[in-house]
Image (cartoon, rainbow, N blue to C red):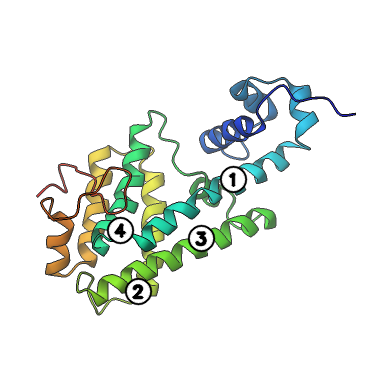
Amino acid sequence: MGRRKNFDEQAVINAAIAVFSEHGYTGTDVGLVCERANIGRSSFYNTFDSLDSLFLRALRDYTARGISAREELRTGTAPAPRLIMHRLGGELAKQCEDEARVGCLSANTAAELGREVDAVCAILDPDHQAWLESYRFVLERGQVEGHIRSELDAKVHAQLLSSVLAGLRIAARVMPADSVQSQATAFVEGLCTRKGLRALHDHTASHTYGRNSPGHLIATESSAQ
């Protein structure tokens, strides 16, 4: 009979996400994870085969958290520019509020490992593709509604949106928050028609969005109009 666990396995995975996000794959060892999760090495190895195994589990868990966010993005009733700004500016604001500013595990892992590890690509590639499809959906909806410039290639700009977010996540680790938000706002404004710009900056529109709801525009000095 196996030993009974005296710790929450999910709590260890959450701790691993935090440690891998902060130190990277190559900068993390079992000791760091055990210290963050407050467990002993014997408990760690009784539950997880290896640090590599835990890393893949942490990455799968982290990417799965995006499923509900993508659904909110696709079903949000706000104008497309506000939905995009919520995704781009909201994620960056959240990162900048964190004193460590470790950012996104997926983006950090892609920057560190590239396509060196097949098992990592098998997790990140479908997640990335799912985000691209959601971005393209919102952009095309915005074009139909007259908020996003019709001459833009929605597929290409979905890819560009993903790249801008990944790049700003890395930059946000050291860049002032207002500068990060200014760049995010400038990018979204570049997608917009005049009608889209009004929708993006109209804080008196009939829609009311909470901070955690799709379409909420993150208020910054650069975006407040």
Q: Amino acid at mark 1?
A: Asp
Q: Disc 4 and disc 3: Cα gap in Å?
A: 16 Å
Q: Are marks 1 and 4 in contact (CB under 8 Å)?
A: no
Packing grade of label 1 (10 A; few <14, some 14-19, many >=20) is some
- Residue 186 horizontal/vertical position (percent): 21, 56
User: What residue did someone put label 3 on?
Assistant: 128
Point 32% across, 46% down: residue: 90
User: What residue did someone put label 1 on?
Assistant: 61
Q: Amino acid at mark 3?
A: His
- Residue 199 horizontal/vertical position (percent): 16, 61
222 and 5: which one is in front? 5
In the displayed structure, would residue 218 be above or below residue 46? below
Q: Are marks 4 and 2 in contact (CB under 8 Å)?
A: no
Task: Provide the secondary structure element on which disc 3 rests.
Answer: helix
User: What residue did someone put label 4 on?
Assistant: 84
Q: Are marks 3 and 2 in contact (CB under 8 Å)?
A: no
Q: Nearer the viewer, mark 4 or mark 3?
A: 4
Task: Provide the secondary structure element on which disc 4 rests.
Answer: helix
98 and 71: which one is in front? 71
Q: Amino acid at mark 2?
A: Ala
- Residue 198 horizontal/vertical position (percent): 12, 61
Q: Name the residue at the bottom extreme.
A: 151
Q: Are marks 1 and 3 in contact (CB under 8 Å)?
A: no
Q: Is residue 100 left or right of residue 123?
A: left
Q: Nearer the viewer, mark 1 or mark 3?
A: 1
Q: Amino acid at mark 4?
A: Ile
Point 74% across, 28% down: residue: 44
Q: Quadrant of residue 206?
A: bottom left
Q: Earlier in the sequence, mark 4 or mark 2?
A: 4
Quadrant where the N terminus lies?
top right
User: What residue did someone put label 2 on?
Assistant: 154
Q: Earlier in the sequence, mark 4 or mark 3?
A: 4
